[in-house]
Amino acid sequence: MAQTITEKIIACHAGRERVRPGEYVEASVDQTWSDDLGAPLTLGLLEQHGIGQVFDRERVFITSMVNAPAQNAHFAAVLKQIRALTGKFEIPLYEMGTAAIHNSLGIEMGRTLPGELIAGGNSHACMAGGLGCFATGMGSTDIAAILATGRTWLEVPRTIRYRYTGTAGRWVTGKDLMLHTIGRIGVAGADNAAMEFCGDPVNALEVEERLSMTNMAIEAGAQNAIIEPDAKTLAYVKDIATRPFAPVYGDPDARVSEEILIPIDGLEPVIALPFLPGNTRPLSAVKGTRLDQVYIGSCTNGWMHDMRVAASILKGRRVAGNLRVIIIPSTTKIHHQCMKEGLAGIFLEAGAAFSMPTCGPCIGAHMGVLAEGERCLSTSNRNFPGRQGHVRSETYLCNPAVAAASAVKGHLCGPDDL
């Protein structure tokens, strides 16, 4: 019986020939991770239940990426606790000079590969599905169970296939395709489903742009998002894979619960207005909106591709007066590469702040928190009330090219407006 790529991956990891949407299965996990928000609870549960070791130290890592470097004594104590617990369980810890956002780090290290089943301790773990694996986010207690057993349970999701047609304009990116999709279906439009992306516009995207699309599947309520691996994907993972992998492809005659056609001819860069990722408008409808801060980074758009795009626009220009611009790559390796290529100098000469990897500004923890009444244009994934600071601040979502151009003008605009 024919199966989708999501169903095939789950069936393989559940030791089954086939699975069907709505079934509950127990499956093996290829890779998991946690961070300084979830790790104290996750590792504390292992300690509490007398579990002395994790199922496989090569299949787990922890990152201190949200409240690190510690901004006060409370978080210093939390980070100290994590160091002690990861030392006890001999789990790799990435922080400070090796800091990274874990959703990106797993990909960069070759730990999330085509055909695998990934369960990460963060809702945006679904990003890895852009490489052709089943990837989903889980809570701290679920991750603890995985660390103890190497297995998890899940409900097999129905698949909704999104078939894109047409040709993207110059400044339309994978981020815009996803914002456009969420704007069309709503933030619950793919509730507990697998979002499967296909079509020529998707195939034309760079791999890191595809990852931006799958990153935001959770913003549509999905359990996972996935793109079948092509030659670009396989070339991307070939030199970084840390273990053998076998790409999986859905059967051509597999049933999906729905197929949605999304034409993109004429699509402009898309902006999500407060306070939902689905509250979208074309850029032309919101040009001129005044800004207080621009943030380029996060696991959604902190890739090397994003850094190069932002630098190409900021080179030889200055950010607008009275505007704060923060640029944060998602991993230390990308941070180093920005320095090697001279991108860091471009950002600094433009008047932007260029920081080590952290989730701080994305979730309003530190290094860029908004005050009451302030407005931020962000390449991150969420713009709920209070997401980046005060509950009466505002966050607009966009792609890195629009963010960089707007940083120069001080208000919402596109690169062609410079």
Image (cartoon, grey):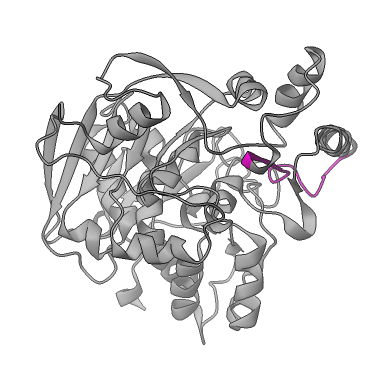
Would residue 315 be found to the left or right of residue 134 on screen?
right
How many marks do you count on the picture? 0
Of all residues, the one furthest to the bottom in this rendering is 316
> Is residue 65 part of the magenta span, yes or no?
yes
Q: Position of residue 159 (x, y in %)?
A: 23, 30
Q: Is residue 345 visible?
A: no
Q: Quadrant of the C terminus?
A: bottom left
> Is residue 67 part of the magenta span, yes or no?
yes
Q: Position of residue 224 (x, y in %)?
A: 37, 34
Q: Is residue 368 visible?
A: yes
Quadrant housing residue 249: top left
Magenta span: predominant SS is loop
Q: Residue at x 31, y 53 (%)?
A: 229
Q: Position of residue 292 (x, y in %)?
A: 55, 56
Whether residue 51 is situated above or below residue 111 in the rendered picture: above
Which region is colored magenta? Answer: 59-72
Q: Quadrant of the N terminus?
A: top left
Quadrant housing residue 147: top right
Quadrant housing residue 155: top left
Q: Nearer the viewer, residue 210 or 107?
A: 107
Q: Residue at x 39, y 24 (%)?
A: 15
Q: Position of residue 37 (x, y in %)?
A: 69, 32
Whether residue 247 is situated above or below residue 184 in the rendered picture: below
Q: Residue at x 44, y 45 (%)?
A: 127
Q: Nearer the viewer, residue 418 or 244?
A: 244
Q: Residue at x 46, y 24 (%)?
A: 27
